[in-house]
Amino acid sequence: TQGSLFATTATVAADSGLAQHELADNNLANTEHAYHLVDTVEGQEVLLQKLLAAKEVCFDTETTSIDASAAELVGMSFAIKPGEAWYVPVPADQAQAQLIVDRFLPFFNHPEIAKIGQNLKYDIQVLKWYGVEVAGALLDTMVMHYLLEPERRHSMDYLAETLLAYKPVSITSLIGKKGKNQKSMRDLPVSEVVDYACEDADITLQLKEVLAPQLAKEVKLQELYDNIEGPLVKVLAEIQYEGIRIDTDFLAAYSAELAKELVELEDRIIAAAGVPFNIASPKQVGQVLFEHLKIPYRWRKTKSGQYSTDEDKLSEIAASHPIAADILRHRTLTKLRSTYLDALPKMVNPRTGRVHSSFNQTVAATGRLSSQNPNLQNIPIRTPEGRKIREAFVPRDADHVLLAADYSQIELRLIAEISGDEAMLEAFQQGLDIHRATAARVFDTPYEEVSREQRNAAKTVNFAIIYGAGSQNLSQQLNISRSEAKELIDTYFDRYPGLKQYMEKTIASAREHGYVTTLLGRRRILRD
């Protein structure tokens, strides 16, 4: 985004210590650089020796696709010191391409040479298709910046502009905007790619020079990078490269089964309505239910003046009005078909016969992974129809199995460990059911005599309180008065005093410093 023309050239971000430039007035045209095309065997051998003599090397790949599982290598760029870089073009012919890549195997396989890159997961995955296993420490500038400033953007262009006051060559200036007329990097003459590719490696190296010292100042964040996030780059590259097999025949059969039920639902809904209408239109659904059928409407309308027909509203009237229940089921089955049953087969990679999702470690500020194309972290599980979709994910062959594992009550185990609350720790150490143990303490009942209702209430209380819910929220969840909810919370903290002290101390620290720190040292900035 464009900054103020009257702002100072650089400011310091209070949360990270990184200098933030608001005007990126440096570029390829006005910055001294030495970029080299290396397109001969002799030149590549000379370059290889330079790389092998270095302790750290930045490398980048140019390819035909942003999808690493479909991409072909177009070239590789390398940088050892700021302002200088080399570009090695890779031809389309597979045999010739493999010869060139193999020439640099001594570098890629060298365990003592650290590899610098921006989004190294992608480059590692691309190179795996050419038989390359990248060895050595990984210094990923995108991940480094993510740890220092988790809520900001982490693209190379953004980092170059804000941290180096440098505006890189835009990829769209080379291949054009997205669309049918967009070119591939393979379509461009090598002469047009050299500066762009070399600049990528050069600028990424310079970003590392800025980010690494700042990360080193934050001991906990450096440990988090060295022990978790850095090694995770290679793990995710491996996961994405392997992908997972799906049974497309199963999905097709299940889709046909749901299609048949959808037709039956549509007939029943239209018959109940007495008028034809578009079931997929929330506006028309609202008009049919609340005007034509005159079902009482007791909620606030939407900003556009329409009836709200979301899941909560329709669920409230579903028991007394079967048409609402049918509309809800119609929506559920339609989404399952479009999002999963019909979409997943289209995502099978023809090269591998498998689905290769992307797992992103620099998106969620909390440190949680996200997944896309497809989102394998969000396969339905709460309904029988949703759970059935999981049957389509199958092992590679008869010699393999799929293993599902989950932590047992991980949130409560962690808060017991972090807070040091003796009562909660004792419950876990004795192998007790933590929700039953909490119910026994809060409701002053012997552990063996705790009822199912008491355990369920205690489970709600356990999670509500550790996630910061107050009496208002808890009263709604348990359907009790606010005064009863407050009494429950007070009793809970009386029984778990260590937990209360920890929460109060954490809140006070957050107010003083503007952030909280996780068990592994991740910093969560609280700007408001």
Image: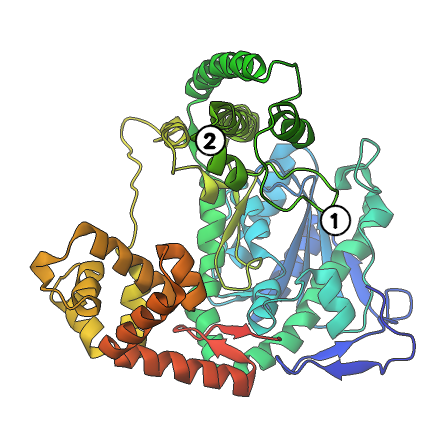
Front residue of this view, candidates 167 and 111: 167
From the top left corner, tell me how far across and down residue 341 is, in percent: 50, 25
Q: Residue at x 43, y 81 (%)?
A: 506
From the top left corner, tell me how far across and down residue 347 is, in percent: 56, 30
Q: Residue at x 37, y 69 (%)?
A: 483
Amino acid type at image mark 2: Ala
The mark lying in front, picked from 2 and 1, is 2
* Residue 339, above or below 143: above
Work out whether residue 83 can be spotted.
no
* Residue 397, above or below 489: above
Quarter holding residue 430 = bottom left
From the top left corner, tell me how far across and down residue 68 is, in percent: 59, 42
Work out whether residue 4 can be spotted.
yes
The label shown at residue 345 is none
Q: Residue at x 14, y 57 (%)?
A: 450
Front residue of this view, candidates 227 and 130: 227
Tag 1 or tag 2, which sits nearer the N-term?
1
Q: Disc 1 marks which residue?
A: 39
* Residue 349, above or below 119: above
Which part of the image, by quadrant, shows the C terminus? bottom right
Dot 2, how many residues are within 10 Å of its Cα: few (below 14), some (14-19), or many (20+)? some
From the top left corner, tell me how far across and down residue 343 is, in percent: 56, 27
In the drawing, does residue 437 fall left or right of residue 56?
Answer: left
The label shown at residue 318 is 2
How many numbered discs?
2
Are the two marked residues, 2 and 1, in contact with CB atoms closer than 8 angstroms?
no
Q: Residue at x 43, y 35 (%)?
A: 244
Query: CA separation, marks 2 and 1?
Result: 70 Å
